[in-house]
Every structure is written in C-alpha cells, then in structure tokens.
Image: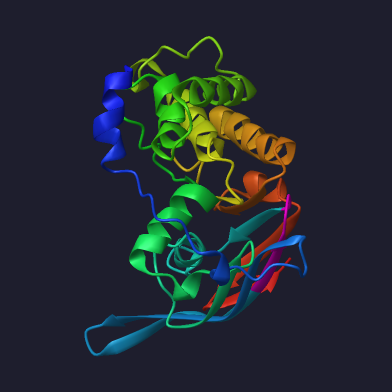
Amino acid sequence: MSDSMSGSISDIINDDIIHDDRVHGGEDKDIIVRVKDLVKNYISGTEILSILRGINIEIERGVSVAVSGQSGSGKSSLLNIIGGLDRCDSGNVEVAGLDICGLSETELSSYRQRRIGFIFQFHYLLKDFTALENVMLPAYMTGMRKKDALEKARLLLADMKLEERLSHFPSQLSGGERQRVAVARAMVNDPDIILADEPTGNLDPRNSAMVAELLFSGAEKWGKALVVVTHDEIVACRAKIRYTLENGILGGL
C-alpha cells in the first residue's frame, strides 16, 4: 500500500477529538468501564421489549470479563452500547472516565476509533489487502505514521503467531488465521477496552481454542480490559470474571 493512498484515506479520517471537559478524571483510575442503571428497550409493533433492565457493572483495567446467555438475551446490545454502536434509553456508561451517553454522533465515531477495539463473529477483513495491511490500516487512518503503523502491526501479528503470513490476503488464510488477524487489528490503536462478540462462533474446536488463548493472552500482555460475549463454555471459563444475562438482568457466576 503506497503513500499515495494517504490523500484519499485522510478524507475519511475523523479528526474530531473528544473535548477534555467530557472526561472526569482523578477517581477510581483502575475502573475503565462503569455502567449504571442501563436500560434498553426495542419496539416491535405495539409491544415494547425490555432487553436490558437496569444493568450495573464495573470493569477494571486489564481484567477479562465473559458474558453468557441465551440468544436474544441482550448480550450484543450491551456490548454495542459500551462500544458506542447503539444508544441506551436511560442510564449511564463511562469508559475511561468519558460519559459516552452524552456524545454526538461525530464524537462517538472518534470514540470508537480511538478507545474501542472490536472483534466480531465474522472477521470483516478487507479482501484486497494483506494481513499486515488490514492490521495497520486503522492506525494509519487515525494519524500514525505509516512506518510506525506497519511496525505495530508486525508486532501484533507476531503475537498472534502469524509472522509467516504477513503478505497473505484473507482468501489465502484459514478461518482461524483470519480471526487472529481480526484480533490483532482490534489492538492496533491501543484501545482502552476490547469488545468481542462471539469471536470463536464460526470456528472449529481446535481453532476456537487457539483464537481464545491468543485473544486473552494478548489482552493480558497489553494490559487491556476485555469483554467477551460467548456461548462457548471453554472461552467463558478463560475470563477472570463471568456474568450471565437473562431476562435483561445481569448476574454473576
């Protein structure tokens, strides 16, 4: 990928920085996520579906958390609200002291780019870019020098045991390898928290175990809070703290 791309890429970079007056620093510095009395409803015809009913949770920096529950229990909704992909109906969500419920759409875009690392069940890699380019691109888009972005991407892909696959395109990688590239990409912008929604859902047991191990060990190495939504008991057991979400209520295990 040449430097000539920088002009077009810069057109889609979100240059808006969240203002300092939205950050409430100085207290409980070990708490990276604080969710209080979170409520989310959906309207289906004439029916109101209560998906999240007064959720309260605090997550410390560097701690891994797993959330389990039946399909439709609200796990992904909780993750999407913390990640700034959806809004709550009431309650409060703070990430690194930042009250995200009061952010504009433009500020939320910047928040997602700079504060959150997303991993989904499908890898969403760009098919015309190599593994190395897929990982470095988010850092390059947020202003990191190309040389530094490439070096950071190489280090993360080495952590994912993919140092021999840097120049391979997604179509040349196995399902497990593609998902490991996605894990590396989620970490490249040094996010405050990594949100993983069924990250092993499309993988066989062997690749699922490998991706889970590299995801948790990578988060530990880089000191990142990690929230994983999963149906996989083996993956959930890897987390330091476990919760279940049932009928809109979050409970501990």
Residue 149 lies in the magenta stretch: no
Say left or right for 231 vs 76: right
Q: Position of residue 151 (x, y in %)?
A: 55, 20
Residue 196 in sight from this viewpoint = no
Q: Quadrant of residue 174?
A: top left
Q: Residue at x 56, y 65 (%)?
A: 20
Q: Is residue 60 magenta?
A: yes
Q: Position of residue 131 (x, y in %)?
A: 43, 21
Residue that sits furthest to the top in the current view: 164
Q: Quadrant of the C terminus?
A: bottom right
Residue 119, horizontal then vertical, whole percent:
48, 44
| Residue occupying image coordinates x 58% and y 28% | 206
Work out whether residue 209 or residue 109 is closer to the camera in this orientation and state it.
109
Displayed quadrant of residue 187: top right
Q: Nearer the viewer, residue 66 or 109?
A: 109
The answer to whether residue 229 is above or below residue 92 is above
* Residue 84 visible somewhere in the drawing: yes
Could you say which is closer to the camera, residue 34 or residue 26?
26
Q: How is the image coloured?
A: rainbow
Quarter of the image with the N terminus is: top left
Magenta residues span 57-63
Residue drawn at point x = 56 percent, y = 13 percent: 163
The image position of residue 184, as x and y in percent, is 54, 32
